[in-house]
Image: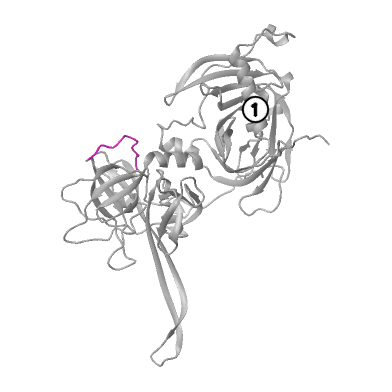
Amino acid sequence: MLIACSCLSPAAVAQKVFPSPSTIEPSATVEHAEDFSEIVVPITSLKITPSLKLGMSGKPGPNLGLEARFGTGFCLDAACGFIVTNYHVAVTTPADKVEREKIVQRYFATGPHDEGATPNYLPNLGVFPYATKRDLAVFELRRPLAHHHGLTFSLDELEVGQEVDIYGYPKGVINPYRKLTRFPAKFKGPTTAGLLAFDYQLSADRPIRIAGASGGIVVDRKTEKIVGILSGTTEATAVAVSIQTLVDFVSKIQPYLAQRIFPATKEISPVSADIYPKFVPLRSDAVLQHRPEEPYEVGVLRQQAQLLADNVRNFIAVQSFAWGSGDKEPDVQAAYEVRVIDGVQRFRSYPDGKKELEEVPLPPRNGFVVPANEWSQLPKMVGTDFRLKLHQAPDIVRNKRGMKVFQYYASVEDNLCPLQPVEDFGFFTVSKTVAVACYGEVWTDEKLNIIRISERLELSEKLKAFRGWEDIYVVLTYGWLERADEPPWLAPLTIYTEARYKKHIYWCRGHFTDYSVFSVRATLVKN
């Protein structure tokens, strides 16, 4: 773990963007507390195609063709820094911007090689396979959309006949002009493909084609909470992706954001705090050469931790970082491809980096903390190699999940918890690695599979080697990684590091995606 405090602070200038306000069909029967034009946004892609065309004289002349593609999206988070739409909208409407704000990252919940992918006809692409029940994509914007915000989601089960409203930007009579439109509908029931079906009606006196509204939202009329994401329509029926599917998708690609948007999710919070006070083994236990036999579950935990440590020695993934301080939004972000071979990790900038790096470059900010390889070292430390003293605490329930809790402690003499404080003076840095004591908790499921490990370093304000740092805390979460024809195995999902320097709190949020696992198998045969 590397932490630093700099004497320099970079300045940045933010530019405000004011999108044109959208209009919506007035309703005489429904009063809306929300302005949905601040939630739902149009997605448009225009392509100019040069060609030759025969003129009046019969001679070919230059001609410019305009191809327009349409879809709808909506704000995922409160600040509207992420836009949700359909996967089929994202691939058929390759927009570079949403409401004049640049798209910097695209996340897809499905694709041609997704499990359960079926052939679907898409305009301009023809037959294109993807899983319709995961017809979702998320756009990360360079800056949040001004004057836009997200809306609350509902995970409650819908009742047949429940009244809802569908909001989207369908094609207008004159393209590319479109306006936000509401389509009243009622819940019909789930489909065999895992979608939600709704009966809806177009306006009789002013019919509107609903094509182009895909990626819009289905909102419960009473609570005005989002209950689905529109993904397709026929003449009288609309189908939508469920909110639970969106929860599962966002939890994988943006786990920290998912915890803020969906607090009722069953996933463990990547910034969760420890449950119990610090565990310190008795001095007599620490010096015993022959300890008494451990409880059965402690022994199983050691085996599971060692198995986890051994399984993450060879893989390739994308590790994303976000740095910030206090309760502010992150002000520096980066992503690297991490390649781990026999436990040694190397990095290169994602996606186009060529140079291999031994460590993640330091972020350009005043004060920061950078995680190291705690995702592999902590399971190894709790495993069978070092025989740290472990203590089983009472079980807990988090998000309706029963979990077992174990506590550990490592002394300075164990030399297992290194710390590298760095002082950055602009022209040079001063650093030195020191060994400290540490302790934390291990959370497992009922089968003792590890799903969370924490680490807190013991720092003394009087020790000059810490260079002013007073408290450092790390939280790791793990999840199941599935590979074809092989049983699933645990892999790191998130790593959160927090440090306190005097009155300032600095943190780094990291998460792993896009795993590629490789291994070597050898068999000895008789010559």
Depicted 238 relative to depicted 61: above or below: above
Find disc 1 in the rendering and name its residue: 307
* Position of the C terminus by quadrant: top right
Residue 8: give x, y in percent of width and height.
63, 44
Q: Is residue 350 left or right of residue 398?
A: right
Residue 269: give x, y in percent of width and height.
49, 31
Q: Which residues are magenta?
A: 151-160
Q: Amino acid at mark 1?
A: Leu
Mark 1 neighbour class, 10 Å CA radius: few under 14, some 14 to 19, many 20 or more:
some
Magenta-colored stretch includes residue 276: no
Question: Could one spot residue 52 in this view of the protein?
Answer: yes
Q: SS at mark 1?
A: helix
Residue drawn at (65%, 37%) of the image? 4
Q: Residue furthest bottom?
A: 57
447 vs 346, nearest the viewer: 447
Q: Is residue 262 left or right of residue 113?
A: left
Q: Residue furthest front?
A: 527
Residue 435: give x, y in percent of width and height.
72, 25
Residue drawn at (54%, 19%) of the image? 405
Residue 459: give x, y in percent of width and height.
65, 23
Tag count: 1
Residue drawn at (41%, 43%) of the image? 77
